[in-house]
Amino acid sequence: MTIWALIPVKAFADAKSRLSGILTPEQRAKLAQAMFRDTLSATALAEGLDGIAVVTKDPEAAEITRLAGACVIDDQTQDLNDALTAGRMTLQNRLGAVDLIIIPADLPAVRASDIEELVKAHHAPTQIVLSPDHEGNGTNMLLTGGLTDFPYAFGPASYQRHISQAKDLGYEATTFERARISADLDNPSDIDEIWQHAPGEHTKQALEAFRLSSHWPLKEVS
């Protein structure tokens, strides 16, 4: 079975709104782009994937994707889960049967080895494998294999919703926990934690440029 990673990317200008208290809109856009570059790089290095597709309406994200040699799917929707469903359908129409792993664009500490290990945890056609965020609330990675009827439920409480949906459909749900996958950078309180997991090079450079490290106060520095 062919396995592809599907990465949804929202417009960089709209990303990371919860960091608005410490970053300007331009800085938040730069940070979102940096995290996407790191996520895409880690995914590209992961062995066992046959391809990477990015579903986005952001021209800059699309250009980064093309330069990395990955596939761009134009997002015509207004909702993350709709975008993922459309992306899945596009890949199935182009490739036929395909296993999918959903990787959010903003995993600043993820490594290729984390993705490889999650893929290896998938051992049955009617199984999903998912990683929760550090609060056990959201879903930071989701492997649905070739299940074409599994509904995406990203958003608040998505981790439990994905597990409940699997149960309702008679599927097995396996939780795969890795600190680097679970590490988020959504709130100011996440910043020191991210440094403990050694963020990717682009994210690291952005945070250092904004002086958002454990050695600096959490405020904008001109």
Image (spheres, grey):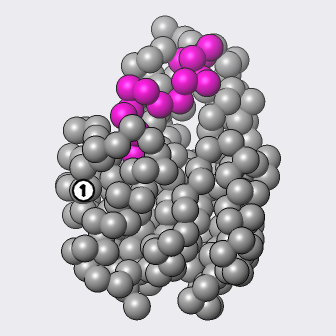
Range of magenta residues: 8-23
The structure residue drawn at horizontal position 26% and vertical position 79%, both measured from the top left corner, is: 95
Q: Is residue 71 visible?
A: yes
From the viewer's perspective, is residue 51 above or below residue 6?
below
The structure residue drawn at horizontal position 40% and vertical position 45%, both measured from the top left corner, is: 9
Work out which residue is located at the far top of the displayed protein and give it: 222
Work out which residue is located at the far front of the displayed protein and give it: 168
In the image, 154 versus 209, the foreground residue is 154
Q: Is residue 200 visible?
A: no
In the image, 31 versus 82, the foreground residue is 82
Q: Secondary structure at mark 1?
A: strand
* Quadrant location of the N terminus in the rendered image: bottom left
Query: Residue 43 location, x and y as percent?
Result: 44, 65
Query: Residue 18 location, x and y as percent?
Result: 61, 24
Q: How many marks?
A: 1
Q: In terms of image quadrants, where is residue 11? A: top left
From the viewer's perspective, is residue 178 above or below residue 124?
above
In the image, 99 versus 193, the foreground residue is 99
Check disc 1 and give the amino acid type.
Val
In the image, 36 versus 126, the foreground residue is 126
Seen in the image, is 91 located left or right of residue 218?
left
The structure residue drawn at horizontal position 59% and vertical position 53%, both measured from the top left corner, is: 153
Q: Which residue is mark 1?
A: 72
Query: Residue 145 location, x and y as percent?
Result: 51, 79
Query: Residue 134 location, x and y as percent?
Result: 76, 50
- In the rendered structure, does residue 214 fall within the stretch colored magenta? no
